[in-house]
Image: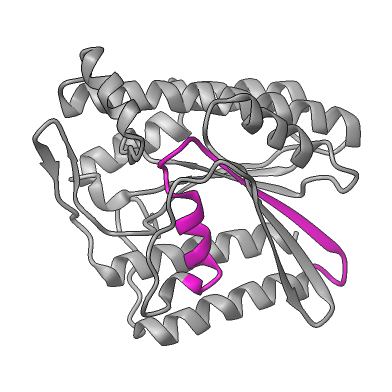
Amino acid sequence: MDPWVTIPSGALAAYRYREEIRSIWGKTLEKLAGKKSNIVFTGMPGVGKTVLLDHLTGRGFDPNYLPPGRSVNAERGKVNRRGNKMAITVIPGQLSQPRLEHLAQAFNAKQPVDGVVHVVCNGFAAQRDPFQVEYLRENGIDTLEKYRIHHRQRELEDFAAVSSAIRVAAQKHRKAPWLLVAADKLDLYGSEAERLAARRYYGSDGGDFFELVNTLRHHVGTDNMTYDLLPACAWIEDFEWAGEKVSPTLGNQERQGLILYLANAIYERCRQ
């Protein structure tokens, strides 16, 4: 099945789906055969890193769940099952010195990073900082198209910083992590044509983002780093900028199906 064309659909109720997701994380840990696994979530501000992780671990399906606010510190957590441990770090997205320090700490730690889930959103980055909103408006970002172009460019800058950290870590540990890019907010990609255009941009030769991935893999060795791209949808809501609004085209069943699909993909990488 091609999840970019045929959107996976979950038929379980939310509470049952949460348990299904948690079961997958449990299987992931069991496949690690007692060793520690270190997974890092990266991506620029507003792409939905923490919300996506909350749903991958099942917490996001709690009835009273609300998306968290803007984060400036690295968020760390552990998932435990039968003595196995998975350390999960969410790196804050702000392009700032603290973020670079968190990247360095995560990738240069004694325990090497096993996998990176890098979250992008095709330009639909949420903007929570009122000063940044005013800055964008004053600098001519006055249409939704300009907004998305601006944030896709910021995604490239953000991934360049992540790539640099991965390269340093790969040289230090003689090991490159697997890389999975999750294209979040698929509910806002209004048509199959737009979804396939995003897949080309992030995952095919000629796509600006994919060219950065190819450069990274060239430096660490293409045989040493696997790369995959999957669609994702952690939260369904309207997106609005400068009076233009995009409404979701997916429902909760498709959202749940995409989360389960992504959780299974992470599981498959951890069991290899």
Residue at image position (68%, 76%) is: 27
Residue at image position (56%, 41%) is: 72
Magenta segment includes 252? no
Q: Position of residue 223 (x, y in %)?
A: 75, 35
- As drawn, is 107 to the left or to the right of 11? right
Magenta segment includes 58? yes
Q: Where is residue 114 in the image (x, y as percent from the top left)?
A: 76, 49
On screen, 69 above or below 240? below
Res. 207 visible in picture:
no
On screen, 54 above or below 243? below
Q: Nearer the viewer, residue 104 or 31?
A: 104
Over which residues does the magenta segment extend? 32-59
> Residue 83's image quarter?
bottom right
Residue at image position (64%, 25%) is: 97
- As drawn, is 157 to the left or to the right of 255? right
Q: Where is residue 176 in the image (x, y as percent from the top left)?
A: 78, 38
